[in-house]
Image (spheres, rainbow, N blue to C red):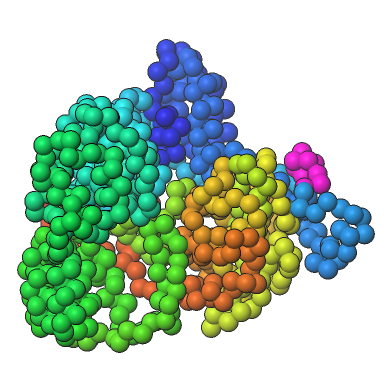
Amino acid sequence: MRTTIIKKTLRVPLSDGAAGDGGTTARQLDAALLKVGFKASRELLEHISSTADAVEYSHEIVRAVKELVGAQAQHNPYFKDFPHNVPDTIAFWLECIYELRTYGRVQHTYEEMLAAHDELIPSLKDRVTVLHLGGTLDEEISRLYLELAASAIPLGEDDRALLGELATQRLDLEPPVVPTRENRAILNAARLVAQRPLIEIDTVTDVLRLACEASGGDVTLREPTRFRSFRRPERRALLAALDGVAASKLGDVNQHREAWKRLGERLHPHEHPFEQAQDVFAVARKEKTARSFAGQVELAFADGDPDLALRILAKAPGLLLRQVDRLVRNGASGVAEAVRVAVPDVSGRVLVSVLEHLANREKPDAARVFANRGRKVWITDDTRAPLDAAAVAEIIQVIEAELVHRLPDFSELTVDPEVLDVVVPMSGTATEDGFGVLPRGSKLWLEGDVLRFFVHWRQKSKRTDYDLSAVLLDENFGFAGHVSWTMLQDEGVSYSGDVTDAADGATEFIDVHLDALNARYVVPQVNVYAGEGFDEVAESMFGFMTRDLDQLGKPFEPSTVRARSAMRGKGKVALPVMFEREGDTWYGTWLHLYLRGTVWGNRVEQNRDLVKLVASAALHRRYFTVRRLAELFARKGSTSDARSIHIGLTQGEAGGVTTVAELGNMLSD
């Protein structure tokens, strides 16, 4: 848990060892951390210096940060000298045939590869991330638990799993507020097993989420859950909770009818005296009819009466905001006024989502690119007519005024320039777990002569072959070439070689020399060629580094890693990020997307046209960024007796920074 806290928060829990002299170890730790791009704060070094178990404690810290940037593995490329001496593609294949070489298996040891490279020459441009001293381990566990539970934006899969683990350890620590329904279900699952009273259940779907989580299933309800056998006290608790909310929410049952039917087989509702709960399962079996609220809206639209649909939606502010596009598109009257009445009761997450959506409705897109909560992509033509500009402008003005009203008072606002084009995070599902990872659509500026990205994976039970590739596009998103195992080099780009088995882990790299590349865009992709998918392997990650030409060093140097992202999507082709050239400057734009692909044999040549559409759509979309939020702060105006606000990526040495990760909660409060 100490390692988890360091990786999630960059705070190091206090050592629980006795007092002693750890001064020498503290100095050694600081040197070891710098090699992987980290630095201990003054308070942390002072704490280690006064600790008797400094050696073991320091080893744990180093292990955590190595895992954070992916340095715990031995990254051994197929071509020992990479990025030098990468052969011509045809010559390489002829050599493999002539020498009867076992293709896809590294022919040298990790130590032999190291001997072929000079030491990295440190640069002032190298990343340095500060680790801070936290509280006791028990205090940090509680702090992290409360932070996750109180998140106003949906958590990603890894954070949901962590919250569930912490909830079982902190049953007596009740968060003051749990705004997200998925989080409530996770907390209630722990309380159900421990036979504690359930909290904050006000819809029938809350009970279904709870049953899914308690069964080890999908609390988001995206995937079917195989419900376990519940103990009699658990069945009674679930049915009692359902009985308390069923009367007014029976219409919601239709959305998940099959799940309710399966759950009813496990709960045996007729064995308990809860008549309202029994009605839920009667609706699921179609023995009773209950029209949902959404169904009433659909009937109004089907009858060609958008004004009636608007009157119905006025009773559900959140649903009304989600249907704004449809209402305007169908000519409903008074939409802006209805929005004005509804917005005080709508979450900031929905308001920002609608604002971003309307900002992208001025004209049809070349293609509509959708990503579900699992980050899986599907693409369709954009056949929608543009919305009336005046109507959209009026609605945007109403929503922005509400967001300005919700912003906290401030005396002074400062924003780090590097975060201006970062998307304000309103959901943890639009990103991946990792280090330096930003929400989908976020742009970051890259400095250095060479951009190097990599994939690392380790198979679980069968031979697994991932292929790192890159599509090169011109300024009009036309195909300008590619690099992969079928094309080892292109102008300014080179590939480290194809590894086809990852029993002990495998790594592939691609180098991009910024001054030698003619393409405008570089879109990395990771293809599952054979074996286990991204959500099946023991581990899989994508990351990128930048360095200057004169720095030398190994193919993988932790201090040059700018970001390391997990890959856990369900598609067979991962598109983690894309890179764009603007003059002499390069930017990265996070995608976090997965294409379906084929069962096996995925190659860059097969999906390059889809990649072009995704890249174009991602770069042309207008996101709700920190820059846009700063404009809203400017409209609010400063207040002399309020606190100052500084927005940055991470907490500084003295704290006092509102991080980008916290902005979503700020807007939702």
Q: Confirm whether residue 636 shows in the render.
A: no
Q: Nearer the viewer, residue 75 or 165?
A: 165
What percent of the width, then of the height, locates residue 392? 20, 80
In the picture, residue 111 is in which quadrant?
A: top right
Q: Residue at image x 74%, y 57%?
A: 497
Q: Residue at image x 44%, y 18%?
A: 50
In the image, residue 78 above or below residue 396: above
Q: Nearer the viewer, residue 124 or 110?
A: 110
Q: Taking 16 as reference, is 414 left or right?
A: left
Does residue 108 show up magenta in the picture? yes
Q: Residue at image x 11%, y 75%?
A: 310
What percent of the width, then of the height, locates residue 397? 16, 75
What percent of the width, then of the height, locates residue 159? 37, 43
Q: Residue at image x 68%, y 41%?
A: 503
Which quadrant does the N terminus fall into? top left
Q: Nearer the viewer, residue 3 or 50?
A: 3
Q: Taking 370 as reference, is 530 left or right?
A: right
In the image, residue 97 above or below residue 42: below
Number of marks in picture? 0
Q: Confirm whether residue 503 shows in the render.
A: yes
Farthest-out residue, right: 98
Q: Taking 555 as reference, is 3 left or right?
A: left
Does residue 180 show up magenta in the picture? no
What percent of the width, then of the height, locates residue 168? 31, 29
**Residue stretch rendered in magenta on the structure:** 106-116
In the picture, residue 288 is in which quadrant?
A: bottom left
